[in-house]
Each structure stands twice: as C-alpha cells, then as structure tokens.
Amino acid sequence: MSFGAAEDVVRAPDLVSAKAKMTLFRLAGYTSIRVTSQWLPGQVAPPESELEILRNVAGAAQLTGVKVYLSVYPPGSRSTPLTPEAREQFAGYLTVLAQQLPAIDDVIIGNEPNLNRFWLPQFNPDGTDAAAPAYLALLARSYDALKAVDPTTRVWGGALAPRGIDRPGTGRDTHSPVAFLKDMGVAYRASGRTLPVMDGLAFHPYADTSGQSPDTPHPKSTTIGLADYDRLIQILATAFDGTAQAGTTLPVLYDEFGVESLIPAGKARFYTGAEPSTTHPVAEITQGQYYGRALQLAFCQPNVTGILLFHSQDEAALASWQSGVYYADGTPKTSLYAVRDALSRARSGSIARCEGLGLDVTATKLHFPTQAELLRGSRDVRFTCSLDCAWELRASSAGTGDIRARLTGYGRAGTPLLASLKGRKLGTEPIRFSLTLTHPVNPGVPQTRDSRTLSLR
C-alpha cells in the first residue's frame, strides 16, 4: 500500500529546493506524495516552466525514496473540458507529461468532478446528470492517450468528493458519489466501449467535519466516508461489473483525507484570514488519533491500495486547510510523532488486525555464524525483517533434528536484529541453525531459513 500525503509545497523551481521540501516530507514518515498540474483551455502541452517544476519533484522523489502520484485537472468549473476539441487538448497535455516524466507511473484524471466547484454543468436542463457522462468521455480519452505513451502507466479516475445533494437548481449543483458512479456506469455501458477507462478509482473520503471520527458510517445518506467502504464497492459493482471496466475488483486510492487542527496562539502570526465555522478543527492530539484511525480502516479494506493525507504542511490561509503535521512555517505539530508512528506501523503490517489477511515476512541481510566464527565462540545470528516479525531461532542436531536450544523475540521492520545463543549448551555433534519468521499481527505462512551444517569441534 501507499502511505503518504497530497502536498504541492514540494513543487519548486529548482531541484535543491524541491529536495529540501521532499526531505522534510519524508521525515514525517510519508513515502508517497500526490502533486497537481492544472490544465487550462487551449493548452495542448504544459509550459516549460511547469515541466521543469515537475521534473524537480520527480527528481527529489527519486532521491528520497518517495512514490509520486500526479493529479491533472482544470482549476475550476469555468475551464471544464466539455467539447471534443477541449478533450483533445487535455489529452495532448497528458501525452507531453507522460513523455517528459517517465518516472511518474500514476496519473489521476480530474478533481471532484461531482462538485460544481470543479465541473459545470452538473445537470442537463431536464434535470438528468450532465457531469458524469462528460467526465467519463474525458476519462476515456485520457486513458487512451496515456496508455499510448506507456501501457504500464496507471490511470486513476474519479477523484470524487464524498458527498453531494443530487438536486438541480439549488445554487450549488452537486452529485453524491453514489449517483455519480452509477451514472458513469450507465454512460459507459451506453458508449459501447470495449476498453477500460481507469485502472483504479481515486476517492476523497473526508468526514462531515474535522470533528467527526473517520470511523463514522453514513448508512442513511449518499455520503461515502472511510467507514462506508462496503457500500463503495457495491456501487462500483453495480456500475461496472459485467463490462470491460472492473467494478468489484477495482483498486481504490484514497488520494485525499484531511483533519484540520486548531492553531495555537504562538503560531497565529503565520496564518491569515478566518477559519470557516463549518470546519470544527480539533486538538492536535485528536488529529493524530484520527489520522491513525484512518490508516487502520484503509489498511483492512481489501481493494484499497493507499491513503494520502491532505496535507503534510498547513496552508497559511485559514479559509483553506490546516490539516498538516507541520505548521505553515514548517515546524512540527505534536501530532507529527503519532502520525509518523502510525505510518510506520501501517507499512510494517501491524497497524490493525484484518480478517483474512496473512502477511509473509522474509529475512533480509541474514547472517548465520560461519564455521570459523562458531569455533571462535560466536553464536550470533544477525538479520532484518521485511515487515514486523515474531522470530524464533533454533539450534538443532544435524543428524536427528533434535532441538538443542531455542530463542524467541520480536522485531520492527527494517531494524537490524541480533539473536544470540551464546552460553547455551549445544552438545558436541554437528548442528544447524534455523530462523523462522511470522508476522505478529497478521500472520501468513511462516518463513524458515537454515544455515549449513556446522561442527562444534
């Protein structure tokens, strides 16, 4: 899975600045990042300045071991690509991005097209859905353009907001994700297309407010939050199962989930404006807890391939998002440490016990004592675990298999470990060391590695 954040602060005009920002990002425990590139009507390619910024992002990501998702969309509803000509321009923009940025393998098409903020019209004059079919047409053209450059590029569709009202003429025309996905399915089936339009669904499962726990379900509404995963998969099944587009099995990327925290008085000078009354920001300790809970939920949802928090660093305008683990001045919040630990446990497979999940742990950098080391008195075994591990070291008779000594312990993923049988009575006959690893929270098949036969004299 991918664990990271949606963060444009790393977009920089030079590699040195991008690398510095990416290093700070990586120090928070994030290993994946989503950055944006905004298309404007008439553009058939990104400006050279935009390409240079994105090259810097890609280079900084490679230097710090961070995976990049690139989100491409029009900046607002006035620039919605509705005509065939506009869709061709958008496809040309994507083509150049794919050609110039070969290190970026994941591209997200659009941003919250179910909201009037980013896509208009939402409804036809007769009240039917205008946005979903038009977005599907853009997604299909984008898919074909990106695959023509590199068939291995993963195209993510949707990027949907978690709620909408599904009523025209309200002054804020929006669609719920339930209605939008179903209407996408109807349009896809009617199109007769025999190819997919996306390799995965991007989704924004925000809670109703920052003050609401992410494990709050919405059984009586069309809102889809983190706790409504089963309903999301059911909707995808209804929309696409039985066609060339995967539905039930479609990978899901939560590419935005944010919880805003209260800004302490000592940091107020780094922010401007006023906080909207609808936000309900929480204490930093609660922010850390909610992010941890969000990671737990996403980790156990089978189709989910990643979750990206929004953001890593606060926006300075209080009308925007103060959802980072860094303040607007780049200094850490107290929530950073809880979030960094939760990210580590998620990557190591231990953040939650998931029904039906079995993780196999392998040993890396494994070193059993050599014959010469054993005769010098060393009985140390050194190794690291690919995930969190419960380990058992045994010394057994090479002839009969009888266990002469046993030692057990636990280790964190990637941490150098030492298991020593020094001082244990091993007899005088030839022996063999065996190291067995299992996952302590989501155990899969135990993995055992054996040394060669060693003589004790």
Image: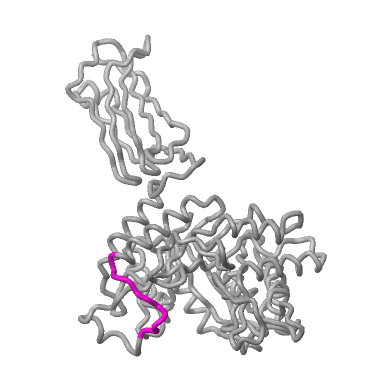
How many labels, in total? Answer: 0
- Magenta part of the chain: 275-285
111 above or below 40? above
**The magenta stretch spans residue 188:** no
Colouring scheme, one of rainbow, by chain, secondary structure, one colour? one colour
Q: Residue at (19%, 23%) from the top-left corner?
A: 377
In the foreground, 23 or 253: 253
In the foreground, 359 or 91: 359
Prevailing secondary structure of the magenta residues:
loop
Q: Position of residue 199 (x, y in %)?
A: 64, 60
Quarter holding residue 106: bottom right
Q: Is residue 373 visible?
A: yes
350 above or below 177? above
In the foreground, 370 or 166: 166
Q: Position of residue 114 (x, y in %)?
A: 61, 76
Q: Position of residue 308 (x, y in %)?
A: 46, 64
Q: Residue at (32%, 16%) from the top-left corner?
A: 403
**The magenta stretch spans residue 278:** yes
Q: Residue at (44%, 76%) from the top-left corner?
A: 8
Is residue 6 rendered to the left or right of residue 396?
right
Q: Residue furthest left?
A: 423
Q: Position of residue 210 (x, y in %)?
A: 40, 71
